[in-house]
Image: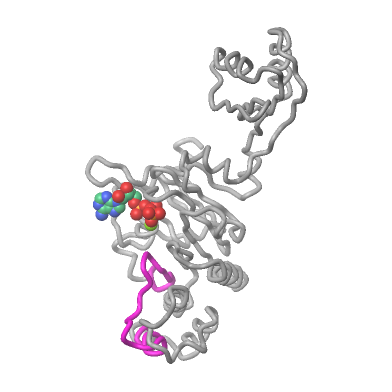
């Protein structure tokens, strides 16, 4: 997009189907850029999965969306209006959030905590009941929060965020520390919220916890957005490995290295060559091997898993 049409778009507001968009959003601490020129686009009514390794800038970005951290540069548009110090008072009445550790007073019951939220925000009994129902916590409300499991604390935190009937819900690592059943409950909750028309941005540093529940994924690494789109778009970026079984895999490896190939791996009697998508390249490699006296027993492709794609995108072992 050229500078002119970019300008025109930002003056008119942003596509009405976007609940959140950021434009060159940047955060620096000293000379360290921790969020780098981010252009997020979160479709209205979707669940947006914000994935990235530890320290990639997820929490910092979410805090900027909530006006808890001041951006160094760029714009944030939420529901077609800019989010900044001047507008945040009004904007935040439509946004629920759970950032880092769950809120709530341990020496009070779940019920008492919810009543505090109700009074602070002047909410109706119906809103409180609906929020508690959404996280399936009705039977736990008379217990002290300090006796809750981590999963129950997370759910109470989400109920507090939901109580204001937000259009947008921002959840930072709500699955952190939960067991598989707790994670499944969060997934189901995300799906229910989407059915109710709430837009959700949810982060995780672990692949596999929430990505299947998300309509759109944004993948962050070292403050930069490496990918934004659907899971199937992400899969379509994958280039498969070529597995070549030969009588001398070490020689085959040396030959390809002499041509600048990297990431080659020996596996039993086969050589794995990453990222070979095209038929032409495959044919060239095999013809060259044969011309160099190698005997080829079998050639096949191995598709990449989502984990492989993440690893290649982020260079991180944790995803
Ligand atoms: N107030 C601050 N001052 C200086 N550096 C900060 C500050 N807050 C965050 N950072 C740095 O910014 C980077 C991004 O941090 P952030 O918490 O946003 O990452 P994250 O993706 O949420 O990581 P995690 O998965 O561990 O929660 C980190 O290197 C962190 O050390
Ligand atoms: Mg974080």
Provide residue 225's location: percent of width, then percent of height.
46, 44
Which range is magenta?
A: 91-117
Q: Looking at the image, what colour scheme do you see?
A: one colour
Check the image and name the residue furthest to the right. Answer: 297
Instruction: Indicate whether 180 appears above or below 3.
Output: below
As drawn, 50 above or below 312:
below
Q: Is residue 261 left or right of residue 282?
A: left
- Residue in the picture at 55% in, 17% down: 257
- Residue 300 image offset from top left, x and y in percent: 74, 30
Tally the numbered discs. 0
**Residue located 33% across and 59% down the image:** 84
In this rendering, position of residue 175 left or right of residue 281: left
The residue that appears at 53% across and 37% down in the rendered structure is 312
Q: Does residue 69 show up?
A: yes
> Is residue 122 visible to us here?
no
Which quadrant contains ligand 2?
Answer: bottom left
Residue 287: percent from left, percent from top = 73, 13
Relative to the observer, which residue lies in front, 307 or 297?
297
Does residue 132 sit above or below 161 in this rendering?
below
**Residue 255: image location, x then y, percent:** 60, 13
Q: What residue occupies the far left of the structure in this picture?
A: 30
Q: Measuring 75% from the left and 18% from the top, which residue is drawn there?
A: 296
Q: Quadrant of residue 302?
A: top right
Nearer-the-camera pick, 82 or 258: 258
Q: Is residue 107 magenta?
A: yes
Left or right, 172 with respect to 88, comes to right
Residue 93 highlighted magenta (yes or no): yes
């Amino acid at each position: 997009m050229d500078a002119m049409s970019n300008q025109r778009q930002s003056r008119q507001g942003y596509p009405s189907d976007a609940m959140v968009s950021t434009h060159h959003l940047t955060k620096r601490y000293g000379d360290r850029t921790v969020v780098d020129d981010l252009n997020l686009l979160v479709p209205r009514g979707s669940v947006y999965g914000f994935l990235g390794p530890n320290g990639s800038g997820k929490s910092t970005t979410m805090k900027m969306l909530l006006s808890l951290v001041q951006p160094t540069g760029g714009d944030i548009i939420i529901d077609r209006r800019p989010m900044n110090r001047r507008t945040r008072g009004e904007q935040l009445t439509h946004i629920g959030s759970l950032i880092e550790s769950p809120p709530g007073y341990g020496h009070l019951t779940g019920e008492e905590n919810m009543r505090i939220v109700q009074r602070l925000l002047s909410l109706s009994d119906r809103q409180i009941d609906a929020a508690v129902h959404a996280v399936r916590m009705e039977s736990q409300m008379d217990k002290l929060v300090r006796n809750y499991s981590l999963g129950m604390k997370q759910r109470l935190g989400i109920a507090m965020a939901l109580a204001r009937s937000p259009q947008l819900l921002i959840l930072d690592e709500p699955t952190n520390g939960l067991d598989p059943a707790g994670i499944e409950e969060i997934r189901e909750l995300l799906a229910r919220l989407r059915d109710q028309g709430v837009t959700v941005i949810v982060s995780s540093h672990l692949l596999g916890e929430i990505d299947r529940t998300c309509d759109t994924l944004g993948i962050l690494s070292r403050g930069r957005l490496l990918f934004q789109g659907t899971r199937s778009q992400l899969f379509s970026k994958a280039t498969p490995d070529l597995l070549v079984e030969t009588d001398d895999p070490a020689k085959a490896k040396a030959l390809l290295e002499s041509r600048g190939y990297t990431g080659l791996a020996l596996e039993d009697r086969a050589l794995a060559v990453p990222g070979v998508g095209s038929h032409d390249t495959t044919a060239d490699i095999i013809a060259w091997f044969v011309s160099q006296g190698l005997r080829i027993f079998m050639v096949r492709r191995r598709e990449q898993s989502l984990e492989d794609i993440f690893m290649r995108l982020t260079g991180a072992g944790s995803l």
